[in-house]
Image (cartoon, grey):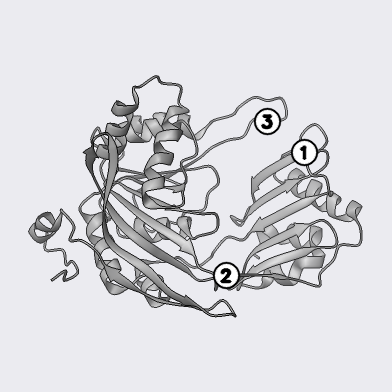
Amino acid sequence: MNDNSSFLVLFLAPVKEYLADDRVSEILINGPGQIYIERNGKLEETPARFASEAQLKAAAVNIAKSVDRQLDEQHPDLDARLPDGSRVHATIPPISRCGTILSIRKFKKDMLTIDKLEEYGSIPREGALLLNAIVKLRKNTIVSGGTSSGKTSVLNALSGLIPENDRILVLEDASELQLQQKHCVYFETRKPDKNGQGEFSIRELVIASLRLRPDRLVIGEIRGGEALDLLQAMNTGHSGSMSTIHANSPIDALSRMETCAILSGVNLPLTALRMQVASAINCVVHTMRLPDGSRKIVEIAEVLPLENGEYRLRSLLRWETRSVSPDGTVSGGFVLGEEPTFRRDAELLHLELPDYR
């Protein structure tokens, strides 16, 4: 932890060794007597304990105060970003029945790149070539997956492939992305203050950002009505934009975008909305955390035009699990699917693609 977040160690002394351990990505405190961590992709229970519920609650309340937020019976839920970039979520009674619950997702200091994903075995060389072509060809891309599957890390790596001369606007609920390009402008939503004033939502950020001449939009996560604004931006010249969404499969990611767009309150016929989704999103990159704790890009799919009002995908590359041993070790491999429809475009820009022959 850096100096700006040294106060965390004071408030959370029982778990300070896990705060300092770079192998630990999350700390999950389920009350004073039950503390788990995720280390190297696997959950494990720790012997760490808080002396009492009062000590744990005081720690959570002090963390809230340190970021100018309230945590009390009238405001029993806290979602905040710490000075070092780590995410903290806390709940207290009455909404959590077993006392104070606290989770800390530590900020990763090391920038994850496509080359590192390949080095870690999260994607093969063929997948890296596909992703490079997708970004360079300005294909609008959604990174999908379940909770803690590595969506943000993959989005970070994808953004690293964006050319330096593009103007990139980064919009997030809580700052996690670390783009390396010089011409990046960062925006972050704002929660309402203790009087319920001053809120600025991700949807408002999307609308405002379109007035700032972005070449590409990078949105940390799609959760609600901002999906429709992003789809419209993608369909009106802001190609090469990207975001993440919670979904269980690539086809489910398109359905989730559709559902989120409906939350905008704009009354569109379902067929018209699906046409927007299918024309705006060009590719879906699906991530998954496997039983052994490893995270992989398990599918790269190209979105095709609707057929009889239904979504269609062309699977370009996918992971196939062959077996899972009793200790959770997963064996399997990546296999190429169908050739992308954008091969000719890639050849014109001298972009290498996998050999599908």
- The span from disc 1 to disc 3 (Cα, nearest Å) is 14 Å
The quadrant of the picture occupied by the N terminus is bottom right
Q: List the residue tagged with mark 3.
A: 193
Earlier sequence position, callout 2 versus callout 1: 2
* Residue at 47% in and 29% down: 204
In the image, residue 314 lies at what x, y percent?
Answer: 24, 54
Q: Is residue 42 depicted above or below 174 in this figure?
A: below
Residue tagged 1: 76
Query: Who is closer to the viewer here, 203 or 287?
Result: 287
- For marks 1 and 3, the one nearer the N-term is 1
Q: Position of residue 248 (x, y in %)?
A: 46, 52
Q: Is residue 10 shown above or below 194?
A: below
Task: Specify the amino acid type for callout 2.
Answer: Gly
Amino acid type assigned to the residue bearing label 3 in the image: Asp
The quarter of the picture where the C terminus appears is bottom left
Task: Determine the residue located farthest toward the top in the rendered image.
Answer: 267
Q: Which mark is residue 41?
A: 2
Label 3, label 2: how many angstroms apart (C-alpha)?
35 Å
Secondary structure at badge 2 equals: loop
Q: Can residue 87 be seen?
A: yes
Q: Residues within 10 Å of mark 2 (few under 14, many from 20)?
A: many
Foreground tag (2 vs 1): 2
Please tell me whether mark 1 sits on a helix, a strand or a loop.
Answer: loop
Seen at 69% across and 62% down, the residue is 27
Residue under the image location 81 percent in, 69 percent down: 48
Disc 3 secondary structure class: loop
